[in-house]
Image: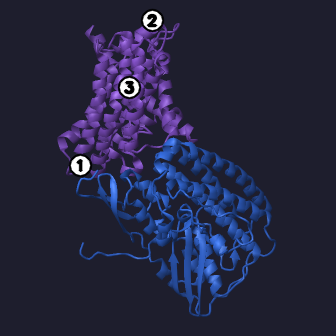
Amino acid sequence: MSYGSTIKVPFGPQHPALKEPEYFLFEVDGDIVVKVTPRIGYVHRGVEKAFEQETYLHNLYLAERICGICSHAHTTCYTQTVEGLIPLEVPPRAVYIRLIMAELERLHSHSLWVGIAAHEAGFDTLFMYLWRDREMIMDLMEEISGNRVTHAINTIGGVRRDITSEQANKIKKFMDKFEANVKEYMKVLETEQTFLKRTKGVGILKPRDAISLCAVGPTLRASGIKSDVRADDPYLAYGEIPFNVITHDGCDVYARTIVRCEEMIESANIIRYALDHLPEGKIKVPPPRTIAPNESVGRVEAPRGELIHYARSNGTAKPERYKVRAPTLGNLASVCQTLIGAHVADIPMILAGIDPCFSCMDRVVIINKDA
Amino acid sequence: MVLYEIVGVFIYPGIAFLFGLAFLYEWIDRKFFARVQNRIGPLYTGRSGILQPVADFIKLLSKEDIVPASCEKPIFSVIPIVYATLPLIALFVIPITGSALIAFEGDVIFLMFVSALITLTVFLAGWSSAGSFSRIGSIRSALQMLSYEIPFGLALIGPAISTHSLSLTKIAQWQAANSSWFLWLQPIGFAVVLISLLAELELVPFDIPEAETEIVAGWLTEYGGRRLALFRLGKDLELVMASTLVASLYLGGAQPLFFIPPVVILILKSIIVLLLISFIRAIFARFRIDQMTSGMWTYLLPLMIVQILLVQFGIGG
């Protein structure tokens, strides 16, 4: 049905479906979206410039605070980049501890997202259950690192804290319970008709579009493309640990949900394997204070997708240039494509489908002088 | 005699009693909903938070009153009062204590009229507040009404055909006299009335007009303070209306049992209906408006027509 003209519907920067400020202008024909114009830059914090002002050690705390959810992914990427600049060999035990934290963080981020997806679909009960489990993962992370959110376990040259054998046993025990719970939730998601109706066939992102629009992470894998930095360019100890790269051919929001659920189970397996094969030894080597002129790029598979950090040193204790590319920026172009042809009621579902983290993404601020 | 009637209207089983029930039902709904979701629910106000709905109501009353500049002020001010009054009027014809405050032949039709008016009030509430989210919400609620109103009406008519009466009191008494509930006689009708009431009350899976993640609070977005308090009271009263209506139409109404007064029986029955409603709203996700309308027309209406045909052929009453 067409009414001849389109209506412009603003979405954001304040909107209950968006936990962070971002603005989208939808042109709507009846109930169907025909054009999407995103506007980014509401939470530009000048992170990259701030990196140039402080020493490498101080910057660790800055990297930690780029994202509130995948803070460990950012420090892992930061330490990896800086250790590439020096270059510095990290003790194997520290590598494994970093990996375990990274996977715990993936569990917490994915369970958060699946909960949000259920909430967007009006399925609050599942949201509550998933967030209850997420709370227990946060407790585990607090026990290991001392912090719930900004874990601050990474440091240049290793990790700050060790995992004791009691902690390892506790984590392993919880992983069994968590895996059983996730399987239960997956059964609910796969059979609950109202949820299927809201997610199946919604927000189709064809594999060809996914590649040409540079989608990353679970969004890309839900379009059936096997791409995961952990497998393609193994960092930490991912080369030594057997795991599957989860893909799904659905290309819709449902596929993105299932990919994340299965990744949670895979992460639980990785954590168990890593704890069983935890090498002995030191957890830290001292890094030098100044770094000779060099360039380095770090790639990490954050829960939301590929995260890239770039650094250039100039012989001082501070980096000359630092660049952060958060996964949401990679997914933004694809989500705008996906939204075209969607119902207005499906906008929150599709937007949430990429697990957006706009505050981590903003590196520019756009000023419209004419407005 | 006049004094007796005044007490009847204002205290028991009238306004004060119904307000009490409304707050009690909101608490039961919230508590049960929370337990299903593995939460605790209201806890601090009164014993196990039983006074929380009252506290919320008083808090909202004391809040600042904000009127949007571009709204239609007369409608915007009157609608909350109308919205709180309509379910109250409907409750006057439902035989809560065994006999209704106002009982007359044809009150089933009056009830349908009131329930349609409630939705129209919702539409006006959203439309007059002139917010974009409110407008979408009010259009959605009108669309929703178009789809559930007819099956709902038919579901009320089913028992009426069997009992040859359009009076709720008589329908309830018929069930008591024949000691057979319409739940067993017309199970499809029971299911349909429950689903339509979920849509009427705008609860999950039909909370489309106020879908939080899509359109903020839908038609309620621009309301705050005492207006919102009245809307919430109206919603609670609607909850009482829906559960007591189902209890008296399909669960035998206020039957006396041994020494227990009929009003207690009816309240217990309606609480069962309330728990059923809470449970349904906990285990489903929200439909999209087009899925809801097409689902209602393709499944609910034919099912209800089958039920009416069965009744006509003498099956189920």
Amino acid at dot 3: Met
Identify the chain drawn in blue.
Answer: A
User: Element type at marker 2?
Assistant: helix
- Mark seen at residue A359: none
- Mark seen at residue B177: 2
On the same chain: label 1 and label 3?
yes
Percent x, y of residue A78? 59, 77
Which one is in front in this view, the residue at disc 2 or the one at disc 1?
2
- Mark seen at residue B241: 3
How many C-alpha atoms fall within 10 Å of the one at disc 2: few (<14), some, or many (≥20)? few
- Left or right: B185, with B237 as reference point: right
Percent x, y of residue A267? 67, 60
- Left or right: A165, with B185 as reference point: right
Q: Quadrant of residue A167?
A: bottom right
Q: CA distance from mark 1 to mark 3?
A: 29 Å
Q: Is residue A127 visible?
A: yes
Q: Quadrant of the C terminus of chain B?
A: top left
Considering only order in the chain, which callout, 3 or 1, is on the residue closer to the N terminus?
A: 1
Percent x, y of residue B158? 38, 18
Identify the chain drawn in purple.
Answer: B
Depicted A353 relative to depicted A233: above or below: above
- From the viewer's side, name the closer residue of B30 and B54: B30
Depicted B279 relative to depicted B266: above or below: below
Residue shown at the point (41%, 39%) measured from the top left: B206
Q: CA distance from mark 2 to mark 1?
A: 52 Å
User: Element type at marker 3?
Assistant: helix
Amino acid at dot 2: Ala
Amino acid at dot 1: Ala
**Do tag 1 and tag 3 residues touch (Cβ < 8 Å)?**
no
Which one is in front in this view, the residue at disc 3 or the one at disc 2?
2
On the same chain: label 2 and label 1?
yes
Indicate how the structure is coloured in the image.
Answer: by chain
